[in-house]
Structures are given as structure tokens and as C-alpha cells.
């Protein structure tokens, strides 16, 4: 299913707590991108290691002692867009760059992805809302952009025995108030994934890639 998600060029975020393997999974999925596609990575520090022949890395930089030379993640996202990427990737969405990322995904940049720190998949909209509000984007505008920009959330957990795994895959829908709500499509059961209410929507978006 994850390979089909990549092949269908759906945009997605990988969510999870600290140490759940978000970066590792994203690196693995980027290795499934077609060899002719150009991936542009924007990261505060280089952590992603995709096995892919066409990767461009953009890395943030702290200010020097005089306070000059600062390069923030939002600057990297803007720079990445000028490079005409086939896939725009933000290593971790945790600041003002959320506005640039959502805008990019709403203007024809299919297949974009990244990670976000969240304890549950249902926490992702609230997390992005907090980041967007801090960047000056009002709640209604953020949810409108989010609904159009992202197709799925892949949530990771770390079991008590230390095993890291995918717990759920959610699709995003809007409720009666216009707010984005994650709806489970796949959930890991005792032995395998079970299909949930959002599965028909996810399957329709994946289409022939599945």
C-alpha cells in the first residue's frame, strides 16, 4: 500500500512521537520514488538518507556570532520551489515553513511529504494549526489549505518492547465546521492491518497504483 501511495504521487505526512522511526520510514519511502524524478530535501540538519539517484539537499544554518547568515527551513522551502522539484520533502515540519509547504502542495507540487511530531494521528491538524497560527495563518485558511494539500497521515508508534511500527494510516476529511479531521483508513490489528471507514477514500485516491 505504501508503494502504491508513492506511485500515485499522493502527498502525506509521517507522524509519531520521539524515536518512533519517522525519518527512517520517510527515507525508505523516498527510495521508492521513480529514478527519473528529482527529490529536493529541505532540512534543518541532514538526517534523511534516501537510496535514490537524484537527490538535492538543502540544509539550514544558524546565525553567526554577529547574528548574520541565518538560513531557516522556510527559506529552504522557498529555495526548493525554485528548483522545480518532482518531490518536495521537508524533513520535519515544526515552524513557519508549514505555510510555504501547504502553499506549494496546493500549487501543483504533487507527492510532497515530510514528518511531524504528534502523539496520535488525530493530533496532526491541531499541531499544524498551532504552527500555522504562529506563522500568521488564520485557522480557517490553514484548514482549507490542509484539506486540499494533504492526502494521508501515516502514524508510527514504539511498542513497549522497543519495536517501531506503523500503527495507522489516516485520510483527511473536513467536518461540518470546515475543519480537517483525520479518519482511519488502515489500522494495525493483532496480526495484520484492518480496513477502517476511510479505506474507500484512500483506495480511490491511490487508484490504479494499488
Image (tube, rainbow, N blue to C red):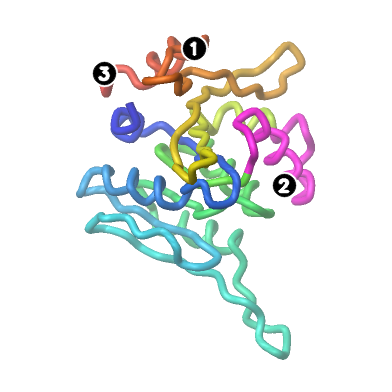
Distance (Cα) linking label 2 and label 1: 29 Å
Label 1: element kind? loop
Query: Residue 131 bears which disc, if any?
Result: 2
- Is 169 drawn above or below residue 106 in the view shown? above
In the image, taking residue 177 as reference, residue 118 lies left or right, namely: left
Marks 2 and 3, the one that precedes in the sequence: 2
Q: Which residue is painted at 72% across and 19% down in the image?
A: 178
Is 140 within the magenta?
yes
Q: Which mark is residue 88?
A: none
The boundaries of the magenta stretch are: 118-142
Quadrant in which the C terminus is drawn: top left
- Residue at x 41% of width, y 31% of height: 10
Total of numbered circles in the picture? 3
Which disc number belongs to residue 196? 1
Instruction: Tell me where residue 118 sits by quadrant.
Output: top right
What element does badge 3 sit on?
helix
In screen coordinates, is 181 left or right of 150?
A: right
Instruction: Give the spatial CA distance, label 1 vs label 3.
Output: 20 Å
Q: Nearer the viewer, residue 118 or 179?
A: 118
Instruction: Give the residue displayed 55% in from the left and 70% down from the top.
Output: 60
Asked if 56 appears above or below 164 in the picture, the reply is: below
- Which residue position is annotated with label 3? 208
Q: Please indicate whether residue 39 sits to the left or right of residue 198 in the image.
A: left
Amino acid at each position: 500500500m505504501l508503494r502504491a501511495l508513492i506511485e500515485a504521487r499522493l502527498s502525506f505526512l509521517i507522524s509519531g512521537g520521539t524515536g518512533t522511526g519517522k525519518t527512517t520510514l520517510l527515507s525508505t519511502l523516498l527510495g521508492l520514488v521513480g529514478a527519473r524524478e528529482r527529490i529536493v530535501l529541505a532540512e534543518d540538519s541532514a538526517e534523511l538518507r534516501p537510496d535514490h539517484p537524484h537527490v538535492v539537499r538543502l540544509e539550514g544554518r544558524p546565525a553567526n556570532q554577529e547574528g548574520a547568515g541565518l538560513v531557516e527551513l522556510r527559506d529552504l522551502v522557498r529555495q526548493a520551489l525554485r528548483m522545480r522539484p518532482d518531490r518536495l520533502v521537508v524533513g520535519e515540519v515544526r515552524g513557519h515553513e508549514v505555510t510555504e509547504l501547504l502553499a506549494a502542495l496546493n500549487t501543483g507540487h504533487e507527492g510532497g511529504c515530510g514528518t511531524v511530531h504528534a502523539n496520535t494521528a488525530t493530533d496532526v491538524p491541531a499541531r499544524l494549526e498551532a504552527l500555522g497560527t504562529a506563522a500568521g495563518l488564520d485557522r480557517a485558511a490553514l484548514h482549507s489549505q490542509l484539506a486540499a494539500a494533504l492526502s494521508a497521515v501515516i502514524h508510527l508508534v514504539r511498542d513497549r518492547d522497543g519495536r517501531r511500527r506503523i500503527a495507522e494510516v489516516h485520510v483527511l476529511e473536513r467536518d461540518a465546521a470546515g475543519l480537517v479531521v483525520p479518519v482511519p483508513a488502515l489500522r494495525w490489528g493483532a496480526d495484520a492491518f484492518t480496513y477502517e471507514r476511510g479505506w474507500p477514500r484512500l483506495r480511490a485516491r491511490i487508484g490504479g497504483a494499488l
